[in-house]
Image: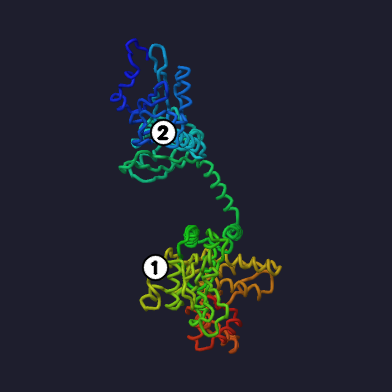
Amino acid sequence: MNSPECGKEELLFDCRRLLDSAHNGIVVIDRKGIIRFYNRAARSIFNDGDRPVIGEHFRDVRPEAWPEFRRVLETGLPQIGKKIELPQATIIANRAPIRCQGKVIGVISIFQDISEYETLISQLQAYRQIKGELEAIFESSYDGLYITDGRANTLRVNKAYERITGLSGRLLIGRNMRDLVKEKVFDSSVTLEVLKRKEPVTLIQRIQGRKEVMVTGSPIVDEKGEIAFVVTNVRDITELNRLKADLERARRISSRMAEYMREQKGLERALDKIIVKSPKMIQVLKTAVQVAKTDTSVLLYGESGVGKSMMADLIHRLSPRKNKPLVRIHCGAIPDPLIESELFGYERGAFTGAAWSGKAGLVETAHGGTLVLDEVAELSLSAQVKLLEVIENKTFTRLGATVPTRVDVRVIAATHQDLEKRIGQGSFRQDLFYRLNGVPIEIPPLRERPEDIAPIALSSLEKLNRAHGFQKRLSAAALDALCRYSYPGNIRELIHIVERMFTMSEGETIDAEDLPWEIRSGVPASSRVWRKGMSLARAVEQFEEEVIREALRQSGSAEEAAQVLGIHYTTLWRKAKKYALSLQK
């Protein structure tokens, strides 16, 4: 700033009103380093507040910047674009000497806070990185991707789409789907269907009259609820159709028995003990697999012997808790006076006969894992209250304790009874029912899924052969007879019948003559009559076996069955052992 009319140096610093309104920070010092001007923007950037700085030496106010200012005073060389990192901001400063008659009489520094710009730059870089990642994902998809806007104009296709369809993106981008359908590039458009129905659509599309693909269009809506884009996933099903035809040919060649065994072995490897072929049970398994991923309570319905225990095991094995305890409690097998102490434990001296050290309950031993409550309808009302506390609050209180214990368990309940009916009778709490009934799964009886009979029978026989070193097999007549029977005892009855045939048959082939009479005749065991050649003792035993079997099937527990039959529980246990009947529901 050279001027012949500069006059006194003081005149150079008489522009306060003009510079004080500037957005950028401005600091002016004289040749001695005394601050002559310090505008409002500078105070704001440096957080100086109302501190009096005019007239102070610059090194006392900004000691970190004084060496640079002194260098400008000494050399007369400006400093342009100096970046300065402050705790509260990042600034860019320009420092220039003030000259009068060729002499340096001070320094003016003009600087700007660029923190906001750096934030914007950082965000822009992040957006660029995200865009690059999305581009990479878009192009790395093995399936074809086709994107249009809300008016069916083509925006993008990926390389996989070009590979699958043989169409070039250059010829498609910018084209409207209606025109492409009119030109018979496509025989139909899933995009137009999505725009029409306003929901995801899947259909088979033929491209240029040759290639067949499966396309699924999904709408993407904007904040106004209007369709902004349609994303279409494209898969080549030509190879799938060929594989399907090959599989059908293989199935025609294979016998029905080989098909049963092959499907059974594959399913046994995948789901261990669960054997499924019927559509009803496949749907049940799908539900079980889905619910296993969560911690939702599950209520398993079904007659005795349908496989509720195996279903509970499957849900546990497929859940995130699979490496934690699986504790099973048969609610009907524990006497009412003991059920609370067995489930929830007790403190020392809680009641007469209690262990000196106290005892942890079965619920506590399942911490972190899964608690399976078989025949939950048998729980007393007081135990139901405590179980509700476990589900709702993840706590329970031992008998004799005053402080609740925290526990993390997933509850799976099972019953063959109508809980809603029990609620109406006042023997089951409605609030507990709603908590247990998070996901209800009803397992159909074996008579409603006859497709499962042959695989279960063959699998049971195979296991017996492996265990005993035999090679017994079922004849076609025996298998057909098994498939015609109604099985009031469900899977448990079928397995017991196979075990009986395996034990009693003499040759390697188990024929229809080796089956129990009720299986051969198709008449349930409860409808048997005396046959010629049958002794009175055998007829009485047979009748007794079936009466006990039916009582166990219709009762909620072995104790209830014994009470209905008017015999002691130990007598029932002894007779059940004699006839190879299970007391577990």
User: Looking at the image, is mark 1 or mark 2 earlier in the sequence?
Assistant: 2
Q: Is residue 527 visible?
A: no
Decide: is 336 above or below 471. below
Going by the picture, which residue comes out furthest to the top?
A: 4
Residue at 32%, 13% in the rendered image:
7
Going by the picture, which residue comes out furthest to the left?
A: 17
Q: Quadrant of residue 131?
A: top left
Q: Quadrant of residue 265?
A: bottom right
* Residue 511 percent across, percent down from the top left: 63, 71
Classed neighbour count for the residue bearing mark 2: other residues with Cα under 10 Å, few (<14), some (14–19), many (≥20)? some
Q: How many marks?
A: 2
Amino acid tagged 1: Tyr
* CA separation in Å, label 1 and label 2: 56 Å
* Residue 135 percent across, percent down from the top left: 48, 35
Amino acid tagged 2: Ser
* Residue 504 percent across, percent down from the top left: 65, 76
Provide the secondary structure element on which disc 1 rests: helix
Classed neighbour count for the residue bearing mark 1: other residues with Cα under 10 Å, few (<14), some (14–19), many (≥20)? few
Q: Are marks 1 and 2 in contact (CB under 8 Å)?
A: no
Q: Quadrant of residue 436?
A: bottom left
* Front residue of this view, candidates 329 and 267: 329
In the displayed structure image, the side of residue 327 where residue 3 appears, left or right: left
The residue that disc 1 covers is 434
Decide: is 78 above or below 191. above
Q: Is residue 464 visible?
A: yes
Q: Which mark is residue 115?
A: 2
* Residue 494 percent across, percent down from the top left: 56, 71
* Front residue of this view, candidates 502 and 143: 143
